[in-house]
Amino acid sequence: MSDDLSDLVRQMLDGMHTLSKTDTILGEPIQAKNATLIPVHRLRIGFAAGTAKGDANADARRGQSGGRGVAGSVQLDPIAVITVGADNKLSGRARHVPFARNAQHIAVVATQRGEHVVALVEAKDVAISPGVGLSGEPRDIVTFDGATAQAVGAAPGLDPARLTLIAAAARAQQMAGALERILEQSVQFSLDRVQFGRPIAKFQAVQQNLANLAGEVAAAGAAADGAAEAIAAHGVDSDIALAEVAIAKLRVGDAAGNGAAIAHQVHGAMGFTYEHTLHHSTRRLWGWREEFGNETLWAERLGRMVAAQGADALWPFVTQGS
């Protein structure tokens, strides 16, 4: 790739990175007459770059670029803007709600008159559009327009940021458990599967893969437990809890990608069949790593926290523990 095309690509990616900040996804609160709106968006990015064949020297003499170019597009879609009015009527929509179609009541974290509240709504009063996530589990769209809350309670300590932190810690625990499960399945399958006259667990390459998978499982479990212990000991508002949850979601997410790949490699073609139970864990791992913040989001938050404290505080920050 030529230098000028590299510069074009770099400028395009820098611009897209600017748009993909957390502040773009979670908009600034909007004060309405009887409610406060908190916009939440889904960011979609497309990118392409390339060159056309031709006589580069002739193009240069004519002052042309030789067919080099880059293109990108950014689409910002609203996901959830839910409000509770003075008459306890809700408006807005939430996407990717797990098992909404199976619920009798739905609890909603929202704001009312500028204060954080939890509203309880009967499922029959809202419109539910069925959807499916990567794991095959329901991830539905819930439209609250016109629904009346059966009960509204103040929740001063439960805003979207705190809720996301707690949910991310919970997802880390679930992912750590799913990783333990695929390790058990992979070890057992390697003992049962016979190839070239002996179990594949006897082959050094398979043993190495299983050892790597065990390492990922151990690291993920330690990170998830550290996040849970930090929240229990220091509270959800502490810097230690935020750091531990960020580290957990980062490390467990990385382990999910590596671990699932190893598990499927050990199982071979058998692990990709719908009848085999391996995908019940691996597809959930792939889906859960994107929920409540993926590795990119939590890496950015962790990096900002470390940078804000300065170089002299880095080592104490790393060694303070939970």
Image (cartoon, rainbow, N blue to C red):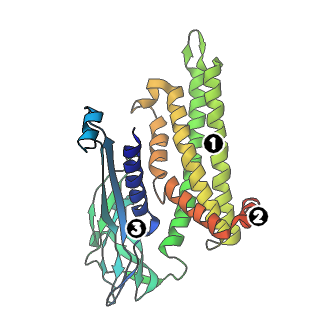
Question: What amino acid type should be assigned to the residue bearing mark 2?
Answer: Pro
Camera-near label (1 vs 3) is 3
**Lower position in the chain sequence, tag 2 or tag 1:** 1
**Lower position in the chain sequence, tag 1 or tag 3:** 3
Are there few (<14), some (14-19), or many (20+) residues within 10 Å of tag 2?
A: few
**Left or right of 148 in this view: 25:** right
Q: Is residue 176 visible?
A: yes
Which type of secondary structure does the marked residue at label 1 adopt? helix
Camera-near label (2 vs 1) is 2
Q: Nearer the viewer, residue 239 or 234?
A: 239
**Lower position in the chain sequence, tag 2 or tag 3:** 3
Mark sitting on residue 217? 1
Taking the spot 36% from the left edge, 73% from the top edge, the residue there is: 39
Residue 43, given in percent of the width and then of the height, sits at 36, 59
Question: What amino acid type should be assigned to the residue bearing mark 1?
Answer: Val
Residue 314, given in percent of the width and then of the height, sits at 72, 62
Does 138 sit above or below residue 21?
above
Looking at the figure, which quarter contains the C terminus? bottom right
Looking at the figure, which quarter contains the N terminus? top left
Which type of secondary structure does the marked residue at label 2 adopt? helix
Which type of secondary structure does the marked residue at label 3 adopt? helix
Mark-to-mark CA distance, 1 and 3: 34 Å
Mark sitting on residue 270? none
The residue where tag 3 is placed is: 24
Taking the spot 61% from the left edge, 29% from the top edge, the residue there is: 209
Mark-to-mark CA distance, 2 and 3: 32 Å
Residue 24, given in percent of the width and then of the height, sits at 40, 67
Taking the spot 68% from the left edge, 64% from the top edge, the residue there is: 230
